[in-house]
Every structure is written in C-alpha cells, then in structure tokens.
Image: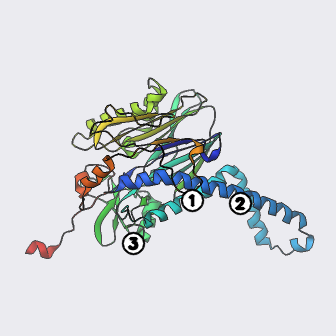
Amino acid sequence: MIVWENFGSRTDTVFCGVFDGHGPHGHMVAKRVRDSLPLKLSAHWEVNVKSEDVLKEISLNAGASLNSEDASLISADEESRVSIDVEEAEKQPEVFQTLKESFLKAYKVMDRELRSYTNIDCFCSGTTAVTFVKQGQDLVIGNVGDSRAVLGTRDKSGSLTAVQLTVDLKPNLPAEAERIRKCRGRVFALRDEPEVSRVWLPHSDSPGLAMARAFGDFCLKDFGLISVPEISYRRLTGKDEFIVLATDGIWDVLSNDEVVKIIASASSRSSAARSLVEAAVRAWRTKYPTSKVDDCAVVCLFLDSNSNNLSTASNTNYNDETVSMEANEVDVKTDDASGPAALPRSGTVREGDEVSGEGDDVSEEGIEETSEHEELLAEVGTEWSALEGVSRLNTLLTLPKFVPDKEEK
C-alpha cells in the first residue's frame, strides 16, 4: 500500500493505493507495482496536461481562422459527432478526462513492463490495484481486481452510511465472464466453493484465478484476463468524511457498513485502520476457523483539514502481528523489529519532492529492505502448491491434472 502526499508536485493532491498480490511471486509483483505505478501515473498526467494546453491553443487558433468556405466542407455527420463529443466532455470535469487517460496509459505501461522483467516470474503471479487521486474535491479512482474503495458519508438524516465506490471485478460479473469466454478462457466454480467463480485455461484446470482483471498473470492474458482499470469519478462534498481502500481480505468477512462503523468508532484516527484489520482478523477466525487469515491491507483517508487525517495498516499470513503506519511515518512499527519474525515494510508514505527526475526509476532512499524478502523466496522454492490455500476465498488455485493412463498403470 502507498500514500503519496503532494502527488505530482501539487499541494492539494494525494495518491493512495492498495495492492494485493497472489500466486507464488505475488508479493514481489505487488511491491513492484506499488513502487512503479504512481510514478508512471504522475508522468503521464503531466504529459496529458501539457498536451491539452497545446490542443486548446491550436483549437482556438483554428476556430478563429475558420472561414465560411472551410465550414461548408464539414459534413452533417461530422458536425453532429463533434457536438456529441463536446456534450460528453462537458458532463465531466477536465481533471477527470485528463486523469482517466493517464490511468489507462499508466496501467497499460505497467503491465507491459511486468512482462519484460526477468527477475520476477509473473506468469502465474499477479496483483490487484485499487488506487485513487484526490485533487481538491475531485476524486478519480482506478481499479483492477477485487480490492475495494468505500466512502463514509452522511445521509440526509445525518447518519453515517457507506457508499461503495468501486466494483469488485470478479469472473462472475456477466460482462467480465462474457469477455473471458469470447477469448476462450473458462469460468466456473469448484464444487467445494460454489460461490467463487474462477478463470481457467481452455484445456487445463489451472490456474483458477478468482478475479477478472489483474496485473501480471500472463498465462491468462490471451484468454480474457486484462489489466485495464475501471475508472470512476466522484465530486466530494462536506458530507463525505473518509475513504477506505482495502484488500478483499477485509470485504470477505466484513460488510461496507461494518467497515464504516469500525473506522468511525476508532479511538483515534491514527488507529482506525489498525482497528479495522484487527476486527477483520477476528472475523476470519470466527467465520473460517480452519482457514489461514487472508492478507488484509487498509488505507483510510479522512477528508477534512485535520492534520492527522491518514491511517494505514496491514497484516500478513507469515505473521499474525498487525503492522501499522501513521501519516508521515517512514518506518513501519512492529513489536520487535530486530527479531526474525519482523515484517518487511508493507507500505510507504511519500512526499511530492521524492519523485526522481529519471523517468520511472524509483528512489530506494528510505525504503527498508530486509532478509524477509529472501526468506519468502526460499519458502516458495521451485514448486508451489496452491492447494494449501484452497480454503482462502480469493486465492490463485492450481489443481493437479488427472491423467487416466497414469492412473491405470
């Protein structure tokens, strides 16, 4: 997860993102996307803003020089098309149109770059990404996968209520399933978990991915899986109090309303995300006592001017301790950072001046690297069985293929 204040060198802008890796190298994919995607988005945003300024100037000049003879060359169809495009553009603020293009380009470049990496195996590993840019009162959200964004806001009666800002992009959605099947991918649920639709290869019962969009997972990219984000916009008002970004480990066991109530009732804003993660862990142990607790990562951004307006927290399957990071902290807090069970850094808070001038290169200053990363790789080894995570509701699943000849022998 990441929170970037003064994003794009704009003092009124913040970028937030939560990334949930899956597969044998999912943690590495999530980390790489977390570190690279914001830089790409910022760069494309800057380019698009400059391009729009140039186009506006050209348009004004062209309009001033257009004489009646030139105007007569425009057909009726072209004229109506131009008017429709103008009407559509006027419905949304300029920042949305610019950021929408920037999100689409940044996500596309990020996925293409993952394919070219030789040090990270993204063939059967990937990550979700739910991200947003808030500039003033404008909120633009880009979402890939089944993590979710929820807004805590006041209704007409003044009661705190939850508004879901994103759609969980899972294979059971009709539009997603249709696209996958048109590309020869298969969508079906296992008998042991009929409520979880998964994506499978055309002629192999693998990998069983429980989401319709993701970064990486290149084994499925020719069969309907895409990394194109769903982009949405919201104009924030004085009734909106906070935004929660969280991985599906939270939403699998808690409803939107429960999440909003937990955040609102936290003893302090800085502990709000931690309280939510702890509540989710308790719910997992109650509802699924024989299952591993799914990864839970939360970013909560409070929308008023209070300086303590940010709360983030996460847990990990490798250790049940909760890791919390408050606004503007650089180091992750743990109970025993020196012990072997200390967790690697799970999130970052960045200031706008941390952007390097070297394109998409990510500055490594202040980013903690521990031996835990190597330990995780050692645990994965050369073979990985996803059957260990069958009880997890959203895992990447690989089943052994039944070969009749071998059974007969």
State left or right for residue 348 relative to residue 89: left
Q: Which amino acid does label 3 sit on?
A: Arg
Q: Earlier in the sequence, mark 3 or mark 2?
A: 2
Observer able to see residue 100: no
Q: Where is residue 332 in the image (x, y as percent from the top left)?
A: 41, 36
User: Which image quadrant for residue 50?
Assistant: bottom right
Q: Nearer the viewer, mark 3 or mark 2?
A: 2
- Most foreground residue, 181 or 376: 376
Observer able to see residue 365: yes
Residue at (66% x, 58% y) in the render: 47
Q: What residue type is labelled 2?
A: Ser
Q: What residue type is labelled 1?
A: Leu
Mark drawn on residue 104: 1
Could you classify mark 1 by the number of other residues whose Cα lies within 10 Å: few (under 14), some (14-19), or many (20 or more)?
some
Could you classify mark 3 by the number of other residues whose Cα lies within 10 Å: few (under 14), some (14-19), or many (20 or more)?
some
- Most foreground residue, 98 or 237: 98
> Contact, CB < 8 Å: mark 3 with mark 2?
no
C-alpha span from label 3 to label 2: 39 Å
* Above or below 199: residue 315: above
Farthest front residue in view? 365
State left or right for residue 102 relative to residue 63: left
C-alpha span from label 2 to label 1: 16 Å
Could you classify mark 2 by the number of other residues whose Cα lies within 10 Å: few (under 14), some (14-19), or many (20 or more)?
few
Name the image quarter holding the N terminus.
top left
Where disc 3 sits, the SS reads loop
Which residue position holds label 2?
Answer: 51
Mark drawn on residue 184: 3
* Above or below 120: residue 168: above
